[in-house]
Amino acid sequence: MMKSIIFGFLLVSAFIISSCKTATAEYPKANIHEVVNSSDVTLVDVRIPEQYSEGTAKNAVNIPLADLQNNMEALKGKKVVVFCNKGIQADQAMEILKKNGIEAYDGTTWKNVKAIQDEKPKAQ
């Protein structure tokens, strides 16, 4: 009897813990294609200026990852897509922006964002 009570308690505890975890961690996935092409988006290239000057997405601003924390006020209230060379710095930038309450989307790489911009609009 005691073993079944303990097992039941553990089972319920595991269920509660896992359900809480997914409830807070899951956000509806935005369509990155729509976000990148929306008129009210701010595209932020978080690479260093030398990399940014070698090529980036259209209308992107350069805020290196190291300077991102100091630029929070300029990004508050904006829809922001961040990207870099391989996506690693973009992931770090996403954490910083979300901690500061900024609506942020992961564009992964500048080539990915540029490719989305260059896509032909689908015929309706």
Image (cartoon, rainbow, N blue to C red):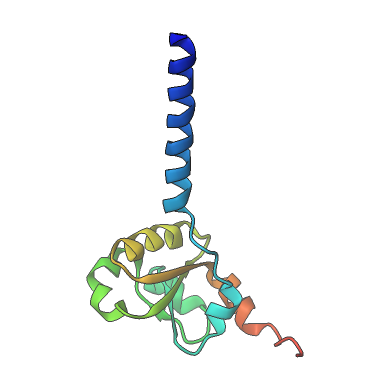
Depicted 28 relative to depicted 56: above or below: above
Comparing 37 with 108, the one in front is 37
Considering only vertical position in the picture, is 86 above or below 79? above
The residue shown at (57%, 72%) is 32
Residue 85 percent across, percent down from the top left: 51, 64
Residue name at image x 43 percent, y 10 percent: 2
Using residue 5 as the reference point, say whether residue 63 is left or right of it: left
As drawn, is 4 to the left or to the right of 31? left
In the image, 6 versus 32, the foreground residue is: 6
47 or 91: which is nearer to us? 91
Q: State the image quarter where residue 102 is shown.
A: bottom left
At 42% from the left edge and 30% from the top edge, which residue is drawn? 13
Q: Is residue 27 left or right of residue 31?
A: left
Q: Is residue 89 above or below residue 18?
A: below
Q: Position of residue 87 (x, y in %)?
A: 50, 60
Quadrant position of residue 97: bottom left
Figure check: 105 above or below 16? below
Residue placed furthest toward the right: 123
Quadrant into which the C terminus falls: bottom right
